[in-house]
Image (cartoon, rainbow, N blue to C red):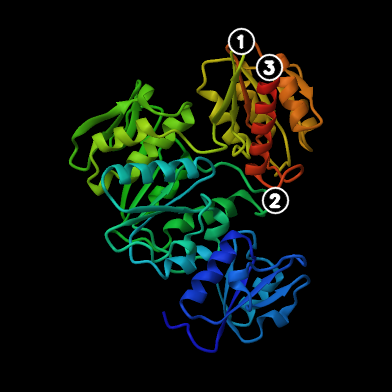
Amino acid sequence: MTDKGNEITLVLGLARSGLAALRLLGREGVKVRAADENQDISLPEDLAGIDLRKGKLDISVLDGVSRMVISPGVPVDHPIVRGARETGVRVISELELAYNYVSAPVIAVTGTNGKSTTVSMIGAILEEAGKDVIVAGNVGIPFSSVAGDLGPEGYYVIEVSSFQLEAVDRFRPVCAGILNLTPDHHDRYGNLDDYYDTKKRIYANCRKEDRFFYNHDDSRCRSAAEEFPGTIIPFSSVGRIDRGVFLDGDSLVRILSDGSEEKVMERNDLGVVGLHNVENALSAIAAVECLGISAEACRRALSSFRGLRHRMEKIAEIRGVSFFNDSKATNVEAAVKSLIGLDRPVVLIAGGYNKGDDFSGLLEIVQKVRAVVTLGKAASLIEDVLAGKVETYRSASMEDAVGKAAGIAEEGDMVILSPACASFDMFDDFEHRGDVFAECVNDLKRSKD
């Protein structure tokens, strides 16, 4: 890198990725300035002494700045970002910054739903195959915090959000994937085309020697594949396709580049449940298809994979009723995917902060639902959509929701928190929401024991 010296790099937004960016830049000897609109924010002890601007920011924060690194929570139309671009300051995302400091190839995954589970599955497969691998990005470990930790023989598997892709420049994964493209983040993007186009920036710099895996069952992903300059590898949970990875009955099958076909595993051998997790497994197998990874390594990794927290995570069983935390389902499509492949009656807990989703999508799964317990600001919107289709019960808190759901559920049922909404009306984030749900379920279990 040639950015050392007197020129300043400004890091705007000081959540996890912003702090990781500051640490990376400090390690590389780059002069930095930190800024955040939260007046109460402070820097950790190891970053003490950095020039910190906070609260109401104006254009003076750009004085002496040649480059700005923006955290995912900072939109590219933010006044300070616009001001930076107008004055010739280079604006990049934390994702782009980290990429500048790695020598290992990057496998990058985006999409509306399933990203965290898929990158974790890919990481598990590569580990099983004996590869050095780090899973990072939007999955919870900032890319900047691990940049440089792998040599050229390893692999970074990075979960990438649309927010991170808004300000990429040279970012080029050797293998990029889009899992699905469905409406989301209406509160951030002016229209859906802007959102979908931002997702496609994941392969903006890819070349003919690079690879792209994508959901063949999603028309928008198929369209994106037509623009990719290199090798494309589709996956499908609907049925057989001519190339790639697909679900054939209950078998996960792949067709290799030489045309040979091999069964990887049976659906029931997966360590996680639900059709959405079958799709995640198919996409993970597609991601490693060109890396010479054996079907046996894929099978061993995916059969022992037990899923991630807040993603159909089993919390407890209470008197024959299973309680699952799917708090990561922050939009309607994610909630539907979680429930659609289940074969047991469900009492659904849903609601929260509405990002502009159309809740009529929930009608797709009402035949699987015994009742819906609503909470949060979107409760009435969900109830209006489901009126006359399924019984709904309003709750005032998560504790109330769990209690009502437990009272409705019958032996053999599943109680699932799959909110179809963001969490910010009642909780810090989806993790906080899921943790509170788990606490309420465990409290209920103790009271019943």
Depicted 350 relative to depicted 331: above or below: above
- On the image, the x and y values in percent for residue 228 come to 37, 54
Determine which residue is flagged by label 3: 448
* Discs 3, 2 touching: Cβ within 8 Å: no
Most extreme residue toward the bottom is 6
Judged by depth in the image, the label closer to the viewer, 2 or 1, is 1
| Residue at 54 percent of width and 59 percent of height | 164
Asked whether residue 386 is in view, the answer is: no
Determine which residue is flagged by label 1: 411
Earlier-in-chain disc, 1 versus 3: 1
Q: Quadrant of the N terminus?
A: bottom left
Element class at badge 1: loop
For this view, does 311 lie left or right of residue 415? left
| Residue at 40 percent of width and 38 percent of height | 216
Q: Quadrant of the C terminus?
A: top right
Determine which residue is flagged by label 2: 187
- On the image, the x and y values in percent for residue 77 come to 66, 66
Asked whether residue 155 is in view, the answer is: yes
* Discs 2, 1 touching: Cβ within 8 Å: no
Crowdedness of circle 3 by 10 Å Cα count: few (<14), some, many (20+)?
A: few
- On the image, the x and y values in percent for residue 363 come to 65, 24
The amino acid on which the numbered mark 3 sits, given as a three-letter code, is Lys
The answer for how far apart the CA atoms under marks 2 and 1 are is: 40 Å
